[in-house]
Amino acid sequence: MRDPYTVLGVSKSADTAEIKKAFRKLAKKYHPDQSKEAKAAEKFAEVNSAYEILGDEKKRAAFDRGEIDAEGKPRFQGFEGFDMGGPGFGRRGHAGGGPGFEHFEFNFGGRPAGQGFDASDLFSELFGGAAGPGGRRGAARGGFGGPAPRGEDITASVTIGLAEAVKGTTTRVTLPTGRTLDVEIPAGIEDGKAIRLKRQGQPSPYGGEPGDAMIHVRVAKHPYFRVEGRDLRLDLPITLYEAVLGAKVNVPTLDSKVELVVPAGSNGGRTLRLRGKGLPTPQGTHGDLLVTLRIVLPDEADSELATIMRKWESQKPYNPRSDLG
């Protein structure tokens, strides 16, 4: 991977706030669910990997000292003594070959020093995963010239609020691997949808690409809005006199409050529609807010109201349940 400072477009003297700001901007730009740029998924993964290094003070310091590379892997420091110009070569001191005999061990494919030379690793390096006669390791790594198997995918979940789902947000997610990432949640995401983070899964044990991370997004239940597709539903309490005489009342939406006209003589259970006050659609429009009226009587008993109702009962009786048989 490229230098993480170059990937995020920041200088080595950048502070934490500058790095985070650069990450948010690029993560939003290359998010696979909303970017139309070529290779957006690869760039998004690269941005995440760069932020994993620079967003962590310890990892950033280790990278600046040259102790780890751009992927967070320890850099080869070499062995004391003889150097043959590449990783895996080193002096191990005198061996049983007699005075003055220098014994060397060759380390290919990252095998820890002291475990000796494994020819299958050498063939793996030379032939893209094939392991020489018999192909014992080659079969596991994809055969001659074939791509090495990628790592396993992993899954994680995150819960956000309804307003965050509508407007989009950035949230921190801890993966099963123990790594923590700031994940950009696109505006308009639906409950149960998943975001794929390329190359953020388990590493391949055979040198192939890492797997992906699937982040399942859950939208928490709202205290008074109910989601129906792209529409929202709301039960609105109104007084008896507002239902009888009509009124203008304030109704909450996800953005602000709007004024709703309650027609005179409205029954409880009547549903009024506020167009365009629902959830955003992929086409750039919005669903509606469906407001159902709920007539609520005073908490305390009112003798005058009871008297009026008795008069109605005796002088103007009616049966709203007549259609029920």
Image (tube, rainbow, N blue to C red):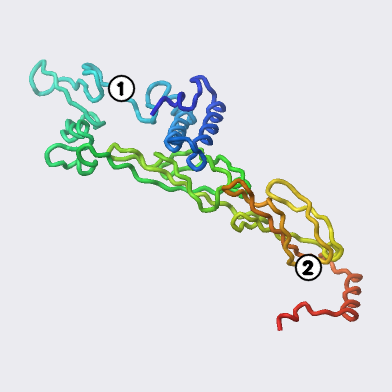
Mark 2 in CB contact with mark 1 (< 8 angstroms): no
Q: In the depicted view, which residue is nearer to us: 226 or 283?
A: 283
Residue 180 placement (x, y as % from top left): 47, 39
Left or right of residue 226, residue 210 in this image: left
Residue pictured at 88% horizontal, 74% vertical: 309
Residue 229 placement (x, y as % from top left): 59, 57
Specify the amino acid type for callout 1: Gln
Q: Which mark is residue 314?
A: none
Q: Earlier in the sequence, mark 2 or mark 1?
A: 1
Residue pictured at 68% horizontal, 48% vertical: 254
Q: Would you name the residue on which mark 1 appears?
A: 77
Left or right of residue 224, residue 207 in this image: left
Query: Where the C terminus falls, by quadrant?
Result: bottom right
Q: Quadrant of residue 168?
A: top right
Q: In the depicted view, which residue is nearer to us: 127 or 34?
A: 34
Q: Helix, strand or loop at disc 1?
A: loop
Q: Would you name the residue on which mark 2 appears?
A: 267
Q: In the depicted view, which residue is nearer to us: 9 or 104?
A: 9
Left or right of residue 147, residue 15 in this image: right
Which label sits in the foreground, 2 or 1? 2
Decide: is 268 above or below 217. Answer: below
Q: Helix, strand or loop at disc 2?
A: loop
